[in-house]
Image (spheres, grey):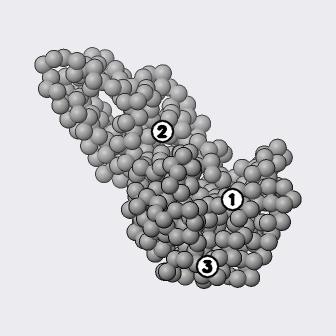
Amino acid sequence: MKKANHFLEDFFTPKSVAIVGATNNAFKMNFRVLENLVNLNFQGQVYPVNPGADEILGIRAFAGLQDIPDKIDLVVSAVPASKTFDIVKDCHEIGAKRLVIISGGFSEGGQEGRKLHDDIRDFTREKGIRVLGPNTLSPINCANRLAISFNPIKNMARGGLSFAFQSGFYEPKINWILSHMGINKMLDMGNKMDINEVDALEYFSGDEDTKVIAMHIESLKGDVSNFFDLLKSVSKEKPTIILKSGRTPAGSKAAASHTGSIARENDLIFDGMIKQTSAIRAQNMDEFFDLAKSFAFLELPKGKELAIITLSGGEGVMATDSCGMNGLNMASLSRDTYQRLKEIYPPWEIPLNPFDAGVCMEFHLSDLISFFQALTAIPQDENVDCIIMQMPPNLFAAILTNPDFPANMMETMRDQFIQWLVSVKEYGKPFAMWCTTMDSQEMKLVEMLEARSLPVFQSSERAIKSFAAIYRYAQKSSLN
C-alpha cells in the first residue's frame, strides 16, 4: 500500500493540528508540545485549545474544539485520562478523524482505566476515528517539521531512517536521535488502543522517504501472521531492525505495568520467525540504535574484509579479536598500499592491519593533515571491503599550545580533518569510527561527523558488530 493511501499519512502530514490542553505555564509538560511546533516552524496551522486562555505563545487559543472555525486534521489530546472521552466525543462532533492521546492511566490504570480504554476504543471504532496511543508521544515528521514531544527539540537532521516505538524510552534521547541519526519519521504506538505494529510496518513499507525501518516492540497487538508476512516482504527491500523487549516472564510483567498488555508470545518462537525474514534483531537498546545508525549511514559492503586503523596497539588487538568473533576477516593489504603507507611509518616496521596510526603519528605531528591523507591508501585498497578507525584524541589543541600558531588554526585543522574523514566515504565502502576519550571535545566532533552521516561508535566492538550485521544483510539480500 502506497503511503498516500494509508491512513497514517494523515497523522504525519496534517495541514492543521489542535493541541487540547495547551498551556502558558512553562512548568507544565504540555507547554512543550505547542512550543515545539512553534519553534520548529511546523508547516501547518496550529490551534491551542484551553478554556482559560485567550492566547498561548502568541497564538489565539480556543475554549474547545467546536470553537475552531477551520477544519482540523489532527487532534492531540493532552488532558487527563478522566477528561479524554469528552475530547473524543468532540472529535466526532467536528468531524476530526485522527487523534493522538498523550495521557496515560487507561489500560495500565487498573479496572477503571481499563474500562475507559475499552469505552474509547469501542466509540472510536464505531465513529471511524483512528487513535494513536494512549500513553504516547509523536508523530514526528522531519519533512514538515511536525514534532509532538515533551522535550524542547533543538534540531531535526532529516534522513531516511524511520522509527516505530511501543514505549517512550526514546523520548529523553530525542535530541540526540534527531541530531545524530538522519530521521525521516517517528511513531510512538503507546498502549496500541488502535494503531499497532502492523499498521506502522505497512505504512513505512510504502513510504518512499523511509529507507531504513527500526521498530521497538513489547507485545504484538496486530495479527501475528500478517506482521510476519509483511516483515518478510519489506525486510528484503528495506533494512528492518527489530528490538523485542518483554522477553522474560519478569520483563513481560514489567511491560504490562505501563502498557496494560502482556507480551504473551514465546520469545524463542518470535526469534525463530524473525530468522525466517531478512530483518535484523537487536539484542539490546545500544545495539538497536547502533544498527539503525549503521544501516542509515553506511553503504552495504561487497565483502567481509575489514581494515582497522587504531591509535593504540592494545585497542588494535581487541578490535582484531572482535573481527574474528563476529564473522569478518582481517583484510590483507596490497604491496602498493604498503609502499604508500611506508612514507608515514616510524623508523621500524609495523603490521599493516591493524594499522597502528598512533605510533606513526608521533613522527608527523608537524603536518597532521598530510599524515591523514596518506591513510587514504587503506580505503583505496582493492582488498578492503570496510574500514573502521579510532578517533584521534584532541591532538590539535595540544599542538596549538605553541604561541606561534594563529588563533584560528585549531578550528581550521579540525575542519580539514572532518573534510578528510567525510571524503573517505567517496570510495563507496562502509567507513566508521570509534571513540577514544569520550570527553566533551570529542563529543562535539562526533556530533559534527554524524551530522555528515559518518557514524561513530562507543567502542571498536560495537562498530564491528554493526559492520557484521550489514554484511550479513547484504549477503542475505543478494540471495533474494
**Which is more N-terminal, label 2 or label 1?**
1
In three-dimensional space, the C-alpha distance between marks 3 and 1, rounded to whole angstroms, equals 20 Å
Of the residues tagged 1 and 2, which is closer to the observer?
Answer: 1
Query: How many discs appear?
Result: 3
The amino acid type found where label 2 is placed reads: Phe
The quadrant the N terminus occupies is: bottom right
Name the residue nearer the viewer: 376 or 248.
248
**Which is more N-terminal, label 1 or label 3?**
1
**Which is more N-terminal, label 3 or label 2?**
3
The amino acid type found where label 1 is placed reads: Pro
Q: Helix or strand or loop: what does disc 3 sit on?
A: loop
Q: What percent of the width, then of the height, locates residue 471? A: 52, 51
The amino acid type found where label 3 is placed reads: Lys
Q: Which residue is mark 2?
A: 457
Q: Helix or strand or loop: what does disc 2 sit on?
A: strand
Query: Label 3 crowding class (10 Å Cα cut-off): few <14, some 14-19, many 20+?
Result: many
Q: Are marks 2 and 3 in contact (CB under 8 Å)?
A: no
Residue appearing at x 72%, y 49% in the figure: 245
Q: Helix or strand or loop: what does disc 1 sit on?
A: loop
Q: Which residue is mark 1?
A: 80
Residue appearing at x 52%, y 70% in the figure: 62
Q: What percent of the width, then of the height, locates residue 143? A: 41, 65
